[in-house]
Amino acid sequence: MQNICQNVCKLTRQVGSFIKNEQLNFSSAKVEIKGKNDFVSYVDKAAEQKIIDGLSVLIPESGFIAEEGTSTKKGIEYNWIIDPLDGTTNFIHGIPCYAISIALMRNDKLILGVIYEINQDECFYAWEGSKAYLNEKEIHVSTTKILADSLLATGFPYYDYQYMEEYMELFKHFMNHTRGLRRLGSAATDLAYVACGRFDGFYEYSLSPWDVAAGAFIVQQAGGRITDFKGNEDYVFGKEIVAGNSAFFDEFLGAVKTYIN
Ligand code: IPD
Ligand code: CA
Ligand code: CA
C-alpha cells in the first residue's frame, strides 16, 4: 500500500502541474454551470480523466466514485473516491487555494488518502497502518486543549440553506469562543490543515464523498477524530463532517450538536 500511495502522490503532482498551467490562461468563458454556485470546466474534467487513467494502471480491477462522472465503474473490492479539483470557485477566480483529493476504499473501509495542494506544492498522505505525512515529513494534529484556544475552518453554505439559521448561530458562538474562523474554499485543504495542526478543527455540511474521504482518513492517521454532526461515523457519505484534534474534540462537537440538529 505504501508503494501505491507513493505512486498516487506522483500522479497528483503530474496532474497538479497540468491544472496550474491551465490556470495561467484561464478565462471565465470556459466555465460551465452545473447548479446554483456549482461550477466546472474542461480543466476539472481533463484532470479527472488523467487521474482515472493513472489509477487504473495501479489497481486494474478498481472502480471509481469521481465527481465529474468520468468513470462509474464499480470495483468489487477496491474503489477510488476522487475530486480532481477541490476549490473550483477559487480556481476560476484565480485564488491560489485548490487541491486534488484521492482516497481508496477496500470494501467499506478507507485505506489510503492523498491530498495535493497545488500552489503550495504540498502533498499530504497516509495509507493503512501508516502515520500521516506532508512531503515526506510526519505530521500530527494540534495539541490545543480547549475551544477558546482553537483556530477553526468551515465552509459557508452556498446552495443548501436548510441549516442556515442554525449555522449562523453556531458561527456566532465560535466567533465568541475561539481564536477565529477561516473559509479557504477547499474542504480537502481544510482537512489537510487539520491533519498537520494548522487548524484545530473543521466543520461543514452538504459535502460530497470526494470532498472529504481522503482528508478524513489522513486526519485519523495523524491522530485526529472525525464524526458527522451527530457524533456518529457517517461522515464519508453522510454529507456533514466535524474533524479535529482529539484533545478538544468533545467540546467542539458538543457546540456543533447544540446548535445544529
Ligand atoms: C467545494 C469545496 C468547498 C466546499 C464545497 C465543495 P468543489 O468543492 O470543497 O470548500 O465548501 O462544499 O463542494 O466544488 O470546489 O470541488
Ligand atoms: Ca470538492
Ligand atoms: Ca471538484
Image (cartoon, rainbow, N blue to C red):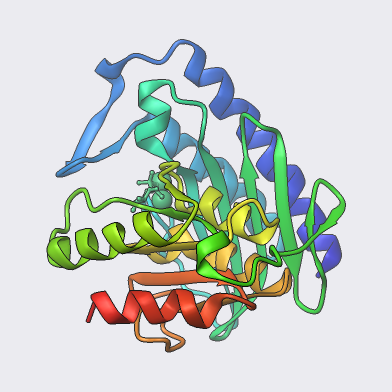
Of 47 and 83, nearer the camera is 83
Let me know if residue 64 appears in the view: no
Whether residue 188 is situated above or below residue 213 in the rendered picture: above
Of 170 and 42, nearer the camera is 170
Of 166 and 109, nearer the camera is 166
Report the side of 78 relative to 36 (left or right).
right
Report the side of 120 relative to 7 (left or right).
left
Pick out the residue farthest to the bottom.
232
Q: Position of residue 81 (x, y in %)?
A: 51, 63
Residue depicted at x 48% and y 51%: 83
Report the side of 15 relative to 172 (left or right).
right
Residue 256 appears in which quarter of the rendering? bottom left
Q: Position of residue 52 (x, y in %)?
A: 56, 51
Whether residue 261 is situated above or below residue 124 in the rendered picture: below
Residue depicted at x 13% and y 59%: 161
Number of on-image labels? 0
Residue depicted at x 45% and y 49%: 180
